[in-house]
Image (spheres, coloured by chain):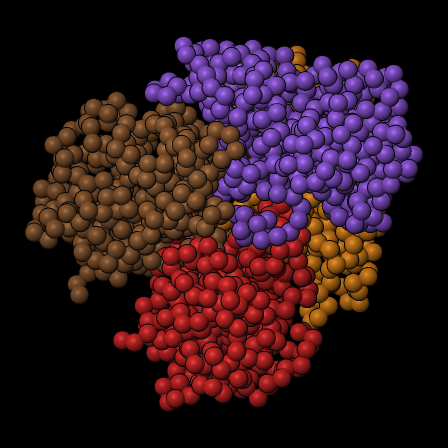
Chain colours: A orange, B red, C purple, D brown
Amino acid sequence: MERIRVCVVGATGFAGIEVCRLVLGHPNMELAMATDRKEAGTRLDAVYPSFAGACDLELSLPEPDTIAQAADVAFLAVPHTASLALTPELLKRGVTVLDLSADYRLHDPEVYEQWYNTPHTSPELLSQTVYGLPELNRKGILALAERRAAGQAVLVSVPGCYPTATALAATPALSAGLAGSDLVIADAISGVSGAGRGANARTHYCHANESVEAYGVAKHRHTPEIEQTLSEVAGRQMNVVFTPHLAPLTRGLLSTVYLEAADGVTAEDVQAAYEARFANEPLVTVLPAGSMPSTSSVFGTARAQVGVALDARRRRTIIASCAIDNLGKGAAAQAVQNANIVLDLPELAGIDMPAPLV
Amino acid sequence: MERIRVCVVGATGFAGIEVCRLVLGHPNMELAMATDRKEAGTRLDAVYPSFAGACDLELSLPEPDTIAQAADVAFLAVPHTASLALTPELLKRGVTVLDLSADYRLHDPEVYEQWYNTPHTSPELLSQTVYGLPELNRKGILALAERRAAGQAVLVSVPGCYPTATALAATPALSAGLAGSDLVIADAISGVSGAGRGANARTHYCHANESVEAYGVAKHRHTPEIEQTLSEVAGRQMNVVFTPHLAPLTRGLLSTVYLEAADGVTAEDVQAAYEARFANEPLVTVLPAGSMPSTSSVFGTARAQVGVALDARRRRTIIASCAIDNLGKGAAAQAVQNANIVLDLPELAGIDMPAPLV
Amino acid sequence: MERIRVCVVGATGFAGIEVCRLVLGHPNMELAMATDRKEAGTRLDAVYPSFAGACDLELSLPEPDTIAQAADVAFLAVPHTASLALTPELLKRGVTVLDLSADYRLHDPEVYEQWYNTPHTSPELLSQTVYGLPELNRKGILALAERRAAGQAVLVSVPGCYPTATALAATPALSAGLAGSDLVIADAISGVSGAGRGANARTHYCHANESVEAYGVAKHRHTPEIEQTLSEVAGRQMNVVFTPHLAPLTRGLLSTVYLEAADGVTAEDVQAAYEARFANEPLVTVLPAGSMPSTSSVFGTARAQVGVALDARRRRTIIASCAIDNLGKGAAAQAVQNANIVLDLPELAGIDMPAPLV
Amino acid sequence: MERIRVCVVGATGFAGIEVCRLVLGHPNMELAMATDRKEAGTRLDAVYPSFAGACDLELSLPEPDTIAQAADVAFLAVPHTASLALTPELLKRGVTVLDLSADYRLHDPEVYEQWYNTPHTSPELLSQTVYGLPELNRKGILALAERRAAGQAVLVSVPGCYPTATALAATPALSAGLAGSDLVIADAISGVSGAGRGANARTHYCHANESVEAYGVAKHRHTPEIEQTLSEVAGRQMNVVFTPHLAPLTRGLLSTVYLEAADGVTAEDVQAAYEARFANEPLVTVLPAGSMPSTSSVFGTARAQVGVALDARRRRTIIASCAIDNLGKGAAAQAVQNANIVLDLPELAGIDMPAPLV
């Protein structure tokens, strides 16, 4: 079988290099091109010595024409607005796009403008874009697969890291009607790679090491994305209070959510709802009652692990915790999972190994 | 001025050794005795090589008579129930006790029995014990100082680490009447030293490194202690949902609390209430609006830093985050702060240095 | 193509679980059986939650008969002496053995007895065992492949972690005759997983974190193994002074070696010799002059990176540094590399991905 | 007693802020002024939130006149050449200088020019400067104390971090004549704070975490300083091969040195020589035979711990390992130790506490 030719745009960012790694290990894909605007002309393994011996690609400029010539599929691991500029050009040229940026995640362009302080320049694409969280939305992604099989280039908007973990933590409670109010408190903790490759005071080892801190309180841009997803799942407007934290690990993200329990809900109901909701999901594991997930268990993978409990003592509250790798299920590996579905490959191709000890 | 002779009981645990360290650096105290039931006869610096050159004490058995002979004050850094056995004996012999265990924290012996699964054997002491959180309860501790000046041995029950940080995070909102409901969600993150010195699968470096996970969900023993304190502050029964997490750092604890805002409360109200509440507290810093604290800023100290925000978007919520060192303000340094007050020393004696870079 | 059935003996140790992980991701192997003497009857993913969703095997007892029934190949990730007991039984039953223990690494059973304080009970196997360091000894391993193709069960003794990195660091200098004396000083640093899964004072997070220390000075058991290999490479008796250190990382091993430079040797000679020696080795990268390797670049992989310099200032000294993953090229991944060769599979099957960001 | 007024120049670098911290905790010193050329006008606690509540100083410009007005003593925690510009001006104005830069460490200005690529502009000061390693050179520092008591401003050049640890590791062997050759191999490992406060690719958490690597091989600027010190100790020209490594910890430095043992030297001789050499040194602990030091044991302190072994197997080699805190005994705390001596204070004033658990 011929390998699908892949271009990774923004290959030197942390999400981009992880897509490159997964594509190199993918049985059905070939890393045909990797771009970086600033380091074009440099070999990828000069930027990431870990790629020495595994990849001899030179970084290119992200030009739509050359990408379309080299690749069938492009993963865009770029900052917001960069995808707005590139995606329509790639689709026009027949390149299927897995967009890891925030540009096509929010259905409403006004909400986008409000949170990202910039106009949305291709709102017409939003209606045909699919939000790529397969565990919530596999049908939508499969519909893209059909369109692609029919010859069309398609666009998947890959979810953010916090929205992925928070959605997986809250979804079973919401879809089973176990929540008694419209408020979800999401308290999340991310590794430092979530802050990106930029070297600054906050990402300095001597600041980040031995430090836990909240940031972006009451204003993080993933908030409307989480709210959009949970509202869809619940079938009503949900209101999210979201607090992200940084902790001293490179990769890993844990989102712990709190929902008021509806009257009469028992711990057994909750556990059963969670197990049922993800029973057929190959990448999501619901842990046995009494267990909570560790980020290290999903390091480097497309997997998520979820644990749930009911605090039945006074103000009855469902507490669910979901662990993912912010660069894995939270970015690159989920992008590959989506690509597998869209390209009619086995959903776990190239992303099925368990996490290494770390 | 003569130095006050101190005995540290349970000196080889993580809280115990931190008390020893602080006493060695204290201008008015002398480490006269250190005990450990299992390692009696061994030198302290054989167990903790960091003490080589600074302390040549040999560990003793924790016998009330020998403690009373050697010391004026005893810090008990022991597991619960061990203090129940020892404290009454020490008080009888005229030794003032700073108890870092949980044994005298809960005012109601039935609540103690319920959460610790063991009867409280000296409930008669509870009424004269003071809960040693000076920022909430300095008057009570000063009253002990008077009793001690009058010749009585007194008992301070030093708060738990999570209760300390959670109380400091929530108190200004509660005491200023800014909370609109009786529910406090407390989501906290602790370093691994919080799990104690015991070597087990969870404290193994290769488990704890690169891992964040919740534990003790809906059943952690600090829950009733937090609830007791917040209810006293609020002047009504508060209900606490508490989820602790472990993160890969040795020391440090962050508690982020969520409270529904009362009608009409503004962000400025919240910030002002927090600043006012701790304006005269030498060890608590309220950060400027927009800033949130890092655990590293209080490493090794008796200090706490607090940041607060109002999420005013939909379901108006006060979000406050307090950083302490779980072994510092969360245990040993707070014990020394209490001792300073009880012994009529300057409150910051021996605990005034800022945190080192870590 | 049918998959080769694999049994991992000692599957719950850190090297064992890494073999399991690699076998699960291997295109030509199937994890048919995993054993653990203490946890037999438990599911592997109950011990390592990272395997949830990826592997539903239950751990078995390591009985030769059942292993031989289930598997064509066994990886022994067991302590020394355990392999002495098991290997002959497996070979007898036609099972090819990749032994990760130290039991068959030393050619001379007397040296084994001297360093391991126990008699070697199957010295007759030593002559037919091959030391599985493919970059030094590929011919020997290929000869096993022929014997296996002819129907014989064969035994590969997989090198230790320190010997692997030290051999790769020193070999080019020795084989090119650039060393002016018979002394090699090897100063190495390992992650904590090298100390094994046992929970003890040294592997406690709060001891290992923020700590670097030497251990086993002048008596580490890898010393004779290093000496044996370097002497073979040099064609004369080499004398090794070896000092291992522990540093706060889970995985990763760096060995920095010092050799007196022979007269007239230049920095260019040294760099050229290193590049030439490994030019055709797919898993070893020699970095450009002026660069030295990081352990993170080879995390989780079978790769090694080597950098070299000549200190030409006074006492001319060759300084070479080799980075591997102690559980990867230093144990499990090298075992799979050997298995690939012996089983006539592509040498990099299942072990070709670059390291993730970590 | 009146407190000595101190100015810290370069207060926002990692060594500078550590001096500030120690001065704040010093019973006989007062932090009168802190300077930073770039952040003058900002409060120190805005740059380091850990200082909130402990210090309300605003950063000033490093002007000689204002420094001389504010302070009796200045600690210069500045890059090389900055001290060349400032030190003569301060001495002229009667300010005693503790210089933490490299500018006055090398006795020979030509060696300085060769390694630092810049001319030495005040070579006339070199002869009256004392190299501040009290354990090797207390007499010289005491002589400065006398000059200062007589009214003169004096200059102490505080040693580098690697030279301090390496000198302490090698000195007993050299001064006791136990070394059989003139070669010292020093293999050292430092925490990331040694790379300074600058945010760059190497100090990014996601690069430094889980990574060990050599750097500056055969060209690190501490090499001539180490060589100068060891040659003085040995009474003959010593030749040093020095390789520094970075490891994932914020603070801590371990230097492991290798020296050929002179004929007939036994392990007992070596241990005895080390114990004797440092028997009266309050800040240096020689560990019992068989033990090696951990960096965590000296975190945040002025202490050093040394372990030594003889590898007597083949090529008899003395292996000694010294642990210090690179910012403590390796910089700031050693500067304070020197200041204490020069100012006729107790040598351990303000630097006597043992390390915290870290």
Q: Which of A89 and B114 is in front in this view?
A: B114
Q: Residue D352: image x %, image y %?
A: 33, 58
Left-right relation of C70 to D190: right
Q: Residue A217: image x %, image y %?
A: 52, 51
Left-right relation of C130 to C290: right
Q: Residue C29: image x %, image y %?
A: 82, 28
The N terminus of chain C sits in image quarter: top right
The C terminus of chain C sits in image quarter: top right
Q: Is residue D198 above or below residue B336?
A: above
Residue at x-position 57% and y-position 88%: B124
Q: In this view, does C114 lie above or below B216?
A: above
Extreme residue in the front direction: D264
* Residue D56, quarter of the rendered image: bottom left
Residue at x-position 22% and y-position 47%: D138
Instruction: Report how many numbered discs are placed on residues in the image.
Output: 0
Residue D338 shows in the view:
yes
Residue at x-position 51% and y-position 81%: B64
Q: Which of B250 and A26 is in front in this view?
A: B250
Residue A302 shows in the view:
no
Q: Which of C113 and B240 is in front in this view?
A: C113
Residue at x-position 52% and y-position 39%: C217
Left-right relation of A228 to A214: right
Q: Nearer the viewer, residue B165 or A94?
A: B165
Q: In this view, does C105 lie above or below C66?
A: above
Q: Residue D239: image x %, image y %?
A: 33, 26
